[in-house]
Amino acid sequence: MLAGVLLLAAALAAAPELRAQTEVLPEVFLSGRVALSDRYPLHYLGLVQGDSVSPAVLDTLSRVLVRDLTLSGFFDMRLPDSPPDTARSLSASTVTYLDGTLEGGAVNYRAEIRLRSAYRGEPFWVHVYEFPADRARPAAHRIASDLIRQMTGEPAITQSRLAFCGKTAQGKEIFSCTFDGFDLVQHTYNSGNVLSPAWSPDGARLAYTSFARGQADVYLLDLASGDSRVFQSTAGVDQAADWAPDGLSLAYSASPDDNSEIYIRGIDGGEARRLTYSFPIETAPTFSPTGRELAFTSDRLGKPQIFIMDVDGANQRRLSTIGDYNDSPAWSPRGDMIAYVRRDRDGFQIYITDPRGESHVKLTSGPGDNMDPSWSPDGLRIAFASNRTGVFQIYTMDIYGRGVERVTNTGMACTNPTWSPVLDDNGEIIITQKK
Amino acid sequence: MKRKDLAKLLIWAGILLFAIVLVAGCAKRQPPEPPPPPPEPEVQVPDTTGQAEREAAARRAAEERARREAEMAARGQIQVVYFDYDKSNLRPDARDASTTNAGILQQYPDWRVLIEGHCDERGTEEYNLALGERRANTVRDFYVNYGLDQGRFNTISYGESRPAAPGHDEQAWAQNRRAVTVIQ
C-alpha cells in the first residue's frame, strides 16, 4: 500500500517531464479551421490529348501537376485509373474532379484545365494556359498553384525556389533552383566563401554572410541585377541575417565587443538596435511571422540552446530544455511551429516544437546529419541539408518528417537552404480565365 | 734739370699713373676666383678604410641574415592552440602553447599578429563562426594579459570553413578545433 502511494507520488512528480517529452505534433489548422489531416479528395481524370501533341509534353505536364498536388499535402489524390466515386454518400459529394485537354499549336501549347464537383458534371472552374513546348514544367507548376489557391485558399509553393550554398572549387557560392530541383542558377562568383543565405519576403533579394573582405560580413544581393552590397561590416563576425516579415529590417549577430550579440537594423541604414547583452554567444535570430518576437541561439547556460525574446529584447525565455546542443531555429511562417537542430545520439537532427516549447517532435534520424531547416512559404514543408548519402545535399520534407524529396543532385556539396516566398511567374505563360 | 728730363719724368709718371689706374680698374673688374679644385683623391688611405667598411657591411649582412634566420626560426616555433569540443577555454596544453607563443611575441615587438579561430565540422556553421571568434579572442586575451600590446593583434573567425585536417573522425576534429597565431 505504502509502496503503491510512493509509486503514485513518483509518477506524479515525473508527470511534467513526461509532458515535456511528448512527441505528438499538434494538429495544424488551415484557413477556415480546416485541419491539415482532413485532406480534400481530388480525383485527377487526366488530360484529353488533341492532335500534334508531343507525348513528352503531355507526360511532363501531367506528371508534374500530379506530383505538385500530392506534395502540397492538401489532397487525397486519386489518379485516372481509380474508379469514380459515384455512390450517393456524403463522401461522394466532397470529391472534386480535375480534368482537361491539351492541344499543340504552331507556337504555343494550349491546356484547358477544369474542376468539377460531380463526375461528368458541369465544371465550376476553367482556366486556359498557353505555353511554349519547352515550358511544360513551369506551366504545370502554375496550374498546380492556381488549383491549390482555388480549392484551399492557401499560398501555393509550386512556383517557389530554394537558394543554398554550393561548394565550388573556388569556395562556397550561392545558387538557387526550383523547389523541385530544376533550373539551377549561380548567383555569386568569387565571393570568398558564403554562408546563411536568407530570402527576402518580397523575393527580390538575398541576405547572406560572405568572407569577401576577409572577415565575415553581411551582404545584400539584388537578384535581378546580380549586384551585392555590404549591409553590415564591423570588426568581428557579422552574420546570420534574417528578414523581418515586412522586409524593411534585418536581425543579425555582430560582435563589436568581442562577443556575438543580436541586433536589428533597417536595410537602408539607420541606427542598429542591440537586443542582447551578455558575455555568451547569441546568434541565429529568426523572426516570428508577426515580427513581434525572435527565436535565437544562446550558450548562456554553457551549451547552445534556443531562446525566445520580444523584438525589443525583453522577456527572454528558454525554448529548448532537452539535449546539450540545440541551434538553427527557424520560425514557421504560420507562426505555430519552430524548427531547430539538436545534437542527438544519431547525429544532428531536425526537431519541431510549438512556440511555448511544450512538445518537441523529432522529424529526421541518422545515420547522417540533417541540418539548416528552412520553412516553405506555406509553412507545411521544411527544406534542410543532409549528408545521408555521404555528401551534403538539399532535401525537403513535410512537417511530420514524411514525403522526403531530394532537391539537389549537382555534384557539389550543398548546404544552408533558404526557401523563397511565393514567386510570380515571369509572364511567359498566358492565362485566360473562363469561369 | 733739363726740360727734356722733366718731360721724360712726366711721361714716366703718366705711364705709371695710367698703369696704376689700369691695374686698379682691372682689379675691380676681376671675376671671382674659381672655387679651388677638389682635393685630389688620396690613393693610399681609401685602400684600408674601404676594406674596413666592406668588412663592416659583410658583418652587418651576416648579422641581418642571422637575425632574419632567428626570426624565421622564432616564427616556426609559434604553436597552434587546440580546444575541446564546443569549448573556448584554454586547457593545460593550450595554456603552455600560448605561453610559448607570448614569449616569442615579446621578443619581436614589431610583429603584427593575426589570430585565426577555427572549429571542427560538427555543429551549425553560424554557431561555429561565433565559437571560432571566441577562441581567437581567448588567445588574444591571454597574450594581452601576458603583457603584450593589444594594438598588435587582429582576430578573425573562419568557423568550420578551413579545416587543417580533412578527415571526419575525432583525430581530424581535434586538429581542427584550434586558434592559429599568424605573423603578418
Image (cartoon, helix red, strand yellow):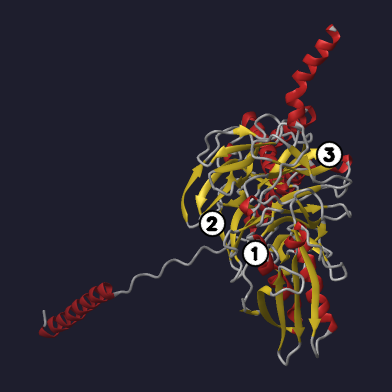
- The image quadrant of residue A381 is bottom right
Mark 3 Cα-neighbour bin, 10 Å: few <14, some 14–19, many ≥20: some
**Front of the two marks 1 and 2:** 1
Q: Which residue is mark 2?
A: A247
Please state, as top left, top right, bottom left or bottom right, where the C terminus of chain A lies in the image. bottom right
Q: Amino acid at mark 2?
A: Gly
Question: Which corner quadrant of the image does residue A348 belong to?
Answer: top right
Mark 3 on the same chain as mark 2:
no
Q: Which residue has dot 1 on it?
A: A149
Q: Which mark is residue A422?
A: none
Residue A323 picture location, percent across and down: 77, 33
Q: Is A335 left or right of A109, judged from the image as shown?
A: left
Eye-nearest disc, 3 or 2: 2
To the question of a shared chain for discs 1 and 2, the answer is: yes
Relative placement, left or right, of B37 versus B129 is left
Question: The disc labelled 1 sits on which kind of residue?
Answer: Arg
Q: Which residue is mark 3?
A: B174
Q: Nearer the viewer, residue A276 or B6?
A: A276
Mark toward the viewer: 1 or 3 = 1
Name the residue rendered at 66%, 77% in the picture: A127
Q: Is residue A320 or residue A256 the one in the foreground?
A: A320
Q: Secondary structure at mark 2?
A: loop
Q: Is residue B166 visible?
A: yes
Chain letter of disc 3 in the image: B
State the image coordinates of residue A396 (x, y, percent, origin top left). Answer: 77, 56
The amino acid sitting under disc 3 is Ala
